[in-house]
Amino acid sequence: MRRHPVGHRPATRRPAGVRRAAVLVLVGACGALVPATARASGPGDPAAPVAAPPVVEQPAPYVGQTVCDPAAKPGTADLAALVLAAYAAGSNGGISRDCAAGGTSEHEEGRAWDWLVRADVPEERAAADRFLGWLTADGPGGESAYQARRLGVMYVIWDGRTWSADRASAGWLPYTGADPHTGHVHLSQSWSGALGQTSWWTGVASRVDHRTCAEVVEGLADPGALATVCSPTPMPEPAPSPAPEPVPGATYTVAAGDTLGQIALDHGTTVAELMAANGLTSTVIMVGQVLLLPPA
């Protein structure tokens, strides 16, 4: 039986009408508990290196770990450095985890980070709640979870609660895993976020790589930067036009913003077939890399 891992978003059935759960802030050993709230950026919060595009990413949907590739991804390492520098609290709990540990966790793909802060230490709790309030706040145009979108954060677990970017309207919900996460904040990122390809770093809204399925949501980003999402309950749709069949021996040169998932989708193949045809052991690709397209 696969154990329920630390840092794995549970497949919770969220009942209709569930109310936004409050994250509680400890204000003193004998003081009252008050709910933390999402808030706009302020002094001391992280500052992006580039301006945001007019339309940012779609909220990152849950794409769980499927392969063993625990090397820390650059965007996740940069997110960790960003938070530690901005809030000067706690310590780095690491990104990578040995796949032999079992279970399902984005740590095993190098795209989850643990920030070691304690819920029972007022200064550390205040820093965590300040960051999470900033991360989950609406954007200047009312966009939900604005900074989480720009950084490609999929979900967060902290102090017995979990929050998901693609279900931001549900707010903070009870977390039922074995570890209540009172000693660290867990952050899992999308592949675009983990590879540092989101608008926080590039100024351009990124695609969302699902690795398994993609559905274009029109009107959410500039042409050429449309987000893609997997519907949780797909409805039957007319059969799409057949994808062009790759010519045996044909190649594709990786461009900026490309992912294996999108390349596979565009050329009528799968990520697994692309990896096998090119002898890849990781889904990380580089601009200018020439990929062999497998025959249909």
Image (spheres, rainbow, N blue to C red):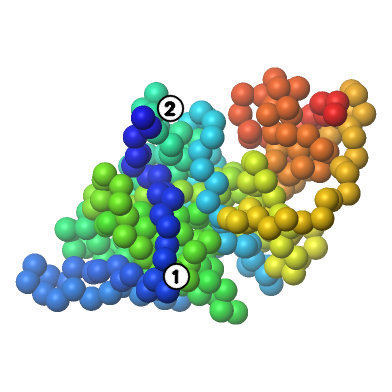
Q: Residues within 10 Å of mark 2 (few under 14, many from 20)?
A: some
Which quadrant is home to the N terminus?
A: top left
- Residue under the image location 30 percent in, 51 percent down: 176
Q: Residue furthest left?
A: 30
Residue 270, picture quadrant: top right
Q: Residue furthest top?
A: 279
Q: Which mark is residue 99?
A: 2
- Percent position of residue 100, x then y: 39, 24
- Percent position of residue 70, x then y: 48, 31
Taking 182 as reference, is 192 left or right? right
Judging from the image, what secondary structure is the residue with disc 2 in? helix
Residue 98 seen in the figure: no
> Mark 1 highlights which residue?
16
- Residue under the image location 47 percent in, 40 percent down: 106
Taking 264 as reference, is 34 left or right? left
- Residue under the image location 17 percent in, 58 percent down: 121
Going by the numbered disc 1, the residue's amino acid type is Ala
- Residue under the image location 62 percent in, 62 percent down: 58
- Percent position of residue 33, x then y: 18, 73
Query: Quick one: label 1 or label 2, which is nearer the N terminus?
Result: 1
Circle 1/circle 2 CB separation < 8 Å: no
Q: Which mark is residue 177?
A: none
